[in-house]
Image (cartoon, rainbow, N blue to C red):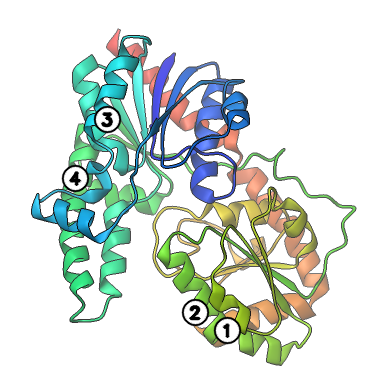
Amino acid sequence: MKILQVSPQFPYPLDSGGKIGIYNIVKQLSRFGAEVAFVAFSRYPIQSEYLEHFQTFCSPYVIYENTSNNLMKVLKFSILNKPILTEKYFTKKSKTFFENLLRKINFDIIHIDHTAMFSVGKWLSIETGKPLCLRLHNIEWLIWERYYKEQTKFSPKKFILKKQTQLLKAKETEAITYSKASFTCTEHDKMLALELVPNANVLVASPGVDLQFWQIDTTVERNPYEIVFATTYNWLPNLDGLKWYLNNVHNIVVKMEPKAFLTILGKNPPEFCKKYPNVNIVGYVPKVQPYYNRANVFIVPLFVGSGVRLRILEAMAMGLPVVSTSIGAEGVAATEADGLFISDIPEMFATNIVNLIQEQKLASELRKNARDFIEKNYSVEKTIKVIYNEYKRLLEESR
């Protein structure tokens, strides 16, 4: 099986859930025996050692394109009546790149990561006659809808975001319709996809966790007072969620348990974090595992999103109980007995954290339960096998 996989970002280093989700697909497909030509868009130069790493399991290519959003670009695509999320990748430069690439490689199937790649993927499918399949890491239009609804009533941004949401919903509907198979991360997202296109071929392939990479180090002693938060800060809902926690929850936690402190991981953490007490700002680290190993609680305060938060699965794989908002935990079929606590109310969110700090016997039991839950339900081999098997079926059907 030869696969052309197209991604909106180069998924390395593994410092965000989005990157890890894409990385797991390309690496696991190659482990199953597929030959993968992996094409990624990037705004920045990719380090040679990252490319060399990918060359050990696939054939990597990079399109250097400025795909950042700005007001003028959003206005331009709104006037053109096109969704910026998909059309900003479908440029003259990217078409030229793929025209040259198509002369060099052969493949059986086109795999695109995210709806953002659909305009590129559809063009490739038409040009080559090869089937197109879509990995819906999220239901994208829903994220945009939740975001625009959070804007103030008379904000110009609200009008633009609403227009873009409508355009994106139509494009996502077209993408699911056109694709031979679409893979959602959750049953909930599958139902949302089928609401758009009732007769579509939609399968659930949950995000997987590489259990060897996310391995607990039992020699490290846990700090019962350490709460950890890790994310990327170039997506506004992550910033808003952290701000909500610090403004509404953190003071309650510290009042109930003065020794409690929050460790913040991730590249370029926001300046506003510095004004809060009991906050340890670490920033970017090559590997988060040492911090996950020593912490006691992982938090996911998120109010906009879709799909599955891979960081929840990774934290649980590292034996960390998780306290999350309902949207943050959307799609993860775990219970409090598995180590996942859900609340959108600041007082309850804080109480869940403090209980895990003060009840160390309970926390110790939940650490084992969380790891067991991930091993049983979210191993990367099990989840990516859904995609691989469907590709085998489609190719056998076409012969």
Q: Mark 1 points at which residue?
A: 249
For the residues marked 4 and 3, what is the alpha-carbon distance in whole angstroms? Answer: 22 Å
Mark 3 Cα shell of 10 Å, populated few (<14), some (14-19), many (≥20): few
Q: Give the side of residue 308 with respect to residue 268, left or right.
A: left
Q: What residue type is labelled 4?
A: Lys
Marks 4/3 in contact by CB < 8 Å: the verdict is: no
Q: Give the side of residue 257 with respect to residue 325, left or right.
A: right
Q: Where is residue 346 in the image (x, y as percent from the top left)?
A: 53, 84
Q: Mark 2 points at which residue?
A: 244
For the residues marked 3 and 1, what is the alpha-carbon distance in whole angstroms? Answer: 47 Å
| View extreme (top): residue | 399
Q: What element carries label 3?
A: helix
Identify the disc placed on residue 93: 3
Q: Position of residue 138 (x, y in %)?
A: 37, 50
Q: What element carries label 4?
A: helix
Residue 207 visible somewhere in the drawing: no
Residue nearest the viewer, comparing 162 with 156:
156
Q: Where is residue 195 in the image (x, y as percent from the top left)?
A: 22, 51
Could you tell me which quadrant the C terminus lies in?
A: top left
For the residues marked 4 and 2, what is the alpha-carbon distance in whole angstroms? Answer: 32 Å
Q: Give the side of residue 303 with respect to residue 15, left or right.
A: left
Asked which quadrant contains residue 97, the reply is top left
Sequence order check, earlier mark of 3 and 2: 3
At a point 57% along the width and 34% down the height, the residue shown is: 47
Q: Mark 4 points at which residue?
A: 171
Marks 1/4 in contact by CB < 8 Å: the verdict is: no
Q: What residue type is labelled 1?
A: Val
| View extreme (right): residue | 219
Q: Is mark 2 on a helix, strand or loop?
A: helix
Sequence order check, earlier mark of 4 and 3: 3
